[in-house]
Image: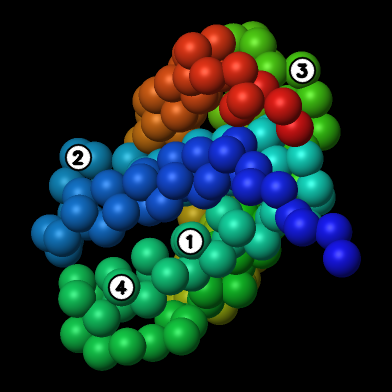
Amino acid sequence: MEQKRFNPRTIAILLFILAVAILRVILNTKTGFSLFTNFTPIGAMALFGSAYFNKSWKAYLFPLLTLWISDMVLSRFVYYHQWQLFYNGAYWIYGAFALMSFAGKYALKNISVRNILLSALLVTFIHWIITDLGVWSAGSLYPKTISGWWACLAAAIPFERNFLGGTLLYAAIMFGSFEWMKIKFPSLAIA
């Protein structure tokens, strides 16, 4: 029987994703609208996992699982004060997240500052369109017309601006730190 080798790269990638998920929970302990609403690491988590995990299933499963666990913690301690497996409309968020991971897997085949910037724009666009489709179609704030759809998209611009900012900041920290660690610890460079 062949013994599986310990892969420090996988552990390091998981720890990066877990760390920003914990930070997401800590920073969301205040409810209500603020200037930084939606300034989260969600986009960076999707990009980072999809860029560095060598197996496709890990690129999707681990970041999605981390998002789900952090959502449950936020549901319990911040938003609803009870444990919830999923909140209303969660499938739009998780669908957007899976699509962001899928896009990141192909957009970040070669990791560079340029590709990370373009990927951050791409995942922000995906998040904007998919999640607002959920807000528009399932909610009662906007009429079910093209003008209602456009009004929904326009209202989301401040949130998506923050989403892009969070994605860029956390991606810079995560990708920059991991690339530096790969130089310092060559075993992390091996896929």
Q: Is residue 23 left or right of residue 46?
A: left
Can see residue 38?
A: no
Q: Residues within 10 Å of mark 1 (few under 14, many from 20)?
A: many
Q: Which residue is mark 2?
A: 35
Q: Of the residues shown, which amino acid type is indicated by label 4?
A: Val
- Amino acid type shown at disc 1: Leu
Residue pictured at 37% horizontal, 45% vertical: 20
Residues marked 1 and 2 touching at CB (< 8 Å): no
Could you tell me how far apart the alpha carbons at marks 1 and 3 are, in whole angstroms? 25 Å
Q: Quadrant of residue 71?
A: bottom left
Around disc 3, counting alpha carbons within 10 Å, would you say few (fewer than 14), some (14 to 19), or many (20 or more)? few
- Which residue is depicted at the point 77% across and 58% down? 3
- Helix, strand or loop status at disc 3: loop
Image side of residue 58 versus residue 56, left or right: left
Q: Rounded to the nearest whole Å, what is the CA distance between mark 1 and mark 4?
A: 10 Å
Residues tagged 1 and 3 counted as in contact (Cβ below 8 A):
no
Q: Please say whether residue 19 is visible from this viewpoint.
A: yes
* Farthest-out residue, right: 1
What residue is pinned by disc 3?
110
